[in-house]
Image: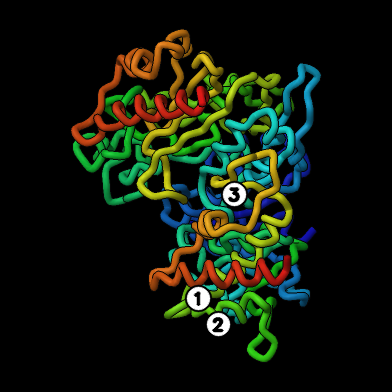
Amino acid sequence: MVGATAAPQDPGARTARTDAPVLATVTFTVNGERRTLELDTRTSLLDAAREQLHLTGSKKGCDHGQCGACTMIVDGRRINACLTLAIMHQGAEIVTVEGLGQPDNLHPMQAAFVRHDGYQCGYCTPGQICSSVAVLEEIKAGIPSHVTADLGAAPQVTEMEIRERMSGNICRCGAYSNIVEAITEVAGSRA
Amino acid sequence: MKSFTYERPSSPAEAAAAVAARPDAKFIAGGTNLLDLMKLQIETPRHLVDVNGLGLDTVEPTEEGGLRVGALVRNTDLAAHPRVRKDYGVLARALLAGASGQLRNKATTAGNLLQRTRCPYFYDTAQACNKRQPGSGCAALDGVNRSLAVIGGSEACIATHPGDMAVAMRVLDATVETVDASGSGRSIPIAEFHRLPGDEPQRDTNLRPGELITAVTLPKPVAGTHIYRKVRDRASYAYALVSVAAILGKDGSGHVAFGGVAHKPWRVEAAEADLPKGAKAVTARVFADAKPTHENAFKLTLAERTLTAALNQARA
């Protein structure tokens, strides 16, 4: 198991321990491609993607899990990539916005964001799109939300559901209503 | 962030032993709170013990008719579990009222119980905080304390437990199961799990060093309308100013716990007999010893009104 124990480079040197980097190795799949990285244990999944793999679609907004700009889909679930360590994802399947679609082959959600102007500056957009794709999967899987009226029934794609479920993605340009329209369109075309 | 070594133990007892062996070690599960605090150097562990590979991620029925929730069951999965939705609605509702979709996908049952306060002075390393740095004082007492505790605080600390899930677990009389380095377990009633700050606000819970949560057990379901009402500054993705977790009958009788008001979920069982008389009778007893600050006395009114809304919902 890679990275099962990551030892300091010089475990005997107590002074060096005060802040010497500790390296570990991790292997995971990113956008369908198997990648092995040697990393400082402190490296977040977000920094690993941006700085080691040069996948700069995922953005660092707040780096504290408050803005959602770093949202990735890991093992089928959206998470804040800034609040998880890369080395905790041995064997994981990671999808970033680059893995959803490319300029010449947009994911339906990316195309819908373009069609509905679901952005202004664009900084939060990769996170919004990853989150949106996962939100529709969560509704399809029957996962309830705070605004689901009946916990015993399957949740529906409504504007209220989308707004609540997207509340972990902040857009300071305020493109929210267009984002909801884009998601609603994709949900409708898939129904 | 301070550098740290990292290991993945192969059993709960091994994990407990690894953390018990050194005072600067910590467990990591979802990591959504711990890594945030490590970035700010509020937490500075030099060794992380990653418990994600230990299993502990199933929800199983108990012989008593309840549910045993593994420590690593993610908040999303617990809220979506059919038995939880059907029989423990207050818990599903509390979970769904907390955090964001991304965070609930990562955050675990045990980690949610262990999340630390969001007192702004705990987070600001330039300020005095006895919880972060024992003996340094409490800048919140005379500071911006609108969001902080109205009851159960001390001269050392008026932080609140920030979570929603624990408030529901308190009204459900859940039990926290743990294992220590020797492999022996114990069961801690949720009422005794979180502490009041007293003169040791650095201790949020009564867990011992290295003690690892393995599960939370829910007793058999309690009939009634399960309600979790959370009042906050915005409609979603914010901490509670006041929350009410309640299981109520049509006549108003039942059980109630309050969140956002104290260092732990706040429940006064003796006051519950007054529930059919209305919210005021209950909150007068529940908050009889309240000592609100210059900014947060509104929470007492809000608690009464939120309970009124819960009672109306149960009667409807």
**For numbered disc 2, what is the local secondary structure?**
helix
Asked if the residues shown at circle 1 and circle 3 are in contact, with their CB atoms under 8 angstroms apart, the answer is no
Count up the numbered dots: 3
Q: Position of residue B62 (x, y in %)?
A: 78, 23
Q: Residues within 10 Å of mark 3 (few under 14, many from 20)?
A: many
Q: Who's the residue at 72% across and 75% down the image?
A: A31
Q: Position of residue A63 (x, y in %)?
A: 47, 63
Q: Position of residue B206 (x, y in %)?
A: 52, 25
Residue with the mark numbered 2: A114
Asked if the residues shown at circle 1 and circle 2 are in contact, with their CB atoms under 8 angstroms apart, the answer is yes
The amino acid on which the numbered mark 3 sits, given as a three-letter code, is Arg
Residue with the mark numbered 3: B104
Q: Nearer the viewer, residue A179 or B171?
A: A179
Q: Is residue B292 above or below residue B230?
A: above
Q: Position of residue A172 (x, y in %)?
A: 39, 69
Residue with the mark numbered 1: A118
Labels 3 and 2 in the same subunit: no
The amino acid on which the numbered mark 1 sits, given as a three-letter code, is Gly
Q: Is residue A5 above or below residue A69?
A: above
Q: Residues within 10 Å of mark 1 (few under 14, many from 20)?
A: many
Determine the CA span between mark 1 and mark 2: 7 Å
Q: Who's the residue at 50% across and 36% down the image?
A: B164
Quick check: can you spot residue B122? Answer: yes
Q: Who's the residue at 25% across and 27% down the image?
A: B292
Q: Nearer the viewer, residue A183 or B158?
A: A183
Report in which chain the residue with disc 3 lies: B
